[in-house]
Amino acid sequence: MRVTVLGYQSPYPGPGGATPGYLLETDEVRLLIDCGSGVLAQAGKHFPIYELDALLLSHYHHDHIADIGVLQYGLMVHQLFGQRPADRPLPIYAPEAPIENVQALTYRDATRFHPVNEQTSLIIGDVKVTFLRTDHGDGDPCFAMRLESKNGVIVYGADSGPGTNWRGFAEGADLFICEGTYLDHNKPQKPNGHLSVRDAAELAESLSCSSLLVTHLFYGYPEEDVIAQAGAYQTGTCYIARIGLQIDVHKQ
């Protein structure tokens, strides 16, 4: 399995940047995980969007979904051009609420909505996907994803506060993609549904994950500060998100 970072910034993209979006490729499928602002422009550097097999959405905050409308337009045009069959709408797997977001996910013949929750188990090509509701603080559901193939296990943590129960879901993951929204100097005293870089590192270490990708970073954070505050993770390789970063994931 290969993960490519198409976007990682939050709450908005920096110059030439993009908010969350991750490409997962296996021998059989090409999956997009979240679809933030600027993600499609980055995706086009790696593959034509009409070859996408599915889109998985963790939740409906703007930084994770901003490019969905233009993705729908793009797929519609590729169907008109004959590059993607009209009877092959892109499946979008996403939470069942809020309803106004759900209603926008089915568009003509281009896309179809499929609901997910903590009981959902999907098989997409050679990838099994299961879901965990995270502590994201505002009442609307947000789901982490566990993506398993014969080559390994990737856990995408989405947005998650310290109240998320990762035991049995993320332990021993070959790659844990975990948000580090805050640095030490701007971490709120009261938890608000997000982790800091230091939190992410400590969590990945406690879960014995084989590698860690720290993401969901403000574009202006100095990389050396992020690296220093991720130092609590010692088990394996720690990656700091950047656009275009590719990680090949193998079963440990």
Image: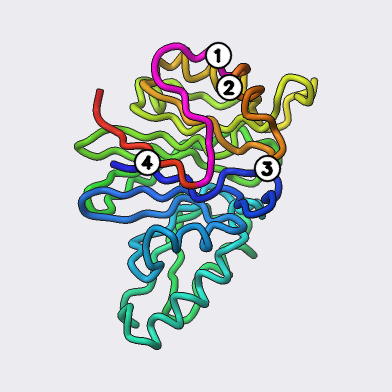
Q: Where is residue 34? Give x, y as percent.
A: 51, 52
Residue pictured at 33% horizontal, 62% vertical: 53
**Near-viewer residue (162 or 237):** 237
Q: Earlier in the sequence, mark 4 or mark 2?
A: 4
Circle 2 is placed at which residue position?
A: 227
| Residue 232 forms part of the magenta stretch | yes
Circle 1 is placed at which residue position?
A: 231
State how far apart marks 4 and 3 are (Cα).
Answer: 21 Å
| Residue 236 forms part of the magenta stretch | yes
Q: Nearer the viewer, mark 4 or mark 2?
A: 2
Circle 4: residue type: Thr
Q: Kindly tell me whether residue 162 is visible in this rendering.
A: no
State how far apart marks 3 and 1 are (Cα).
Answer: 32 Å
Q: Earlier in the sequence, mark 1 or mark 4?
A: 4
**Near-viewer residue (145 or 12):** 12
Verify CB contact (< 8 Å) between mark 1 and mark 2.
yes
Residue pictured at 37% horizontal, 87% vertical: 81
Circle 4 is placed at which residue position?
A: 130
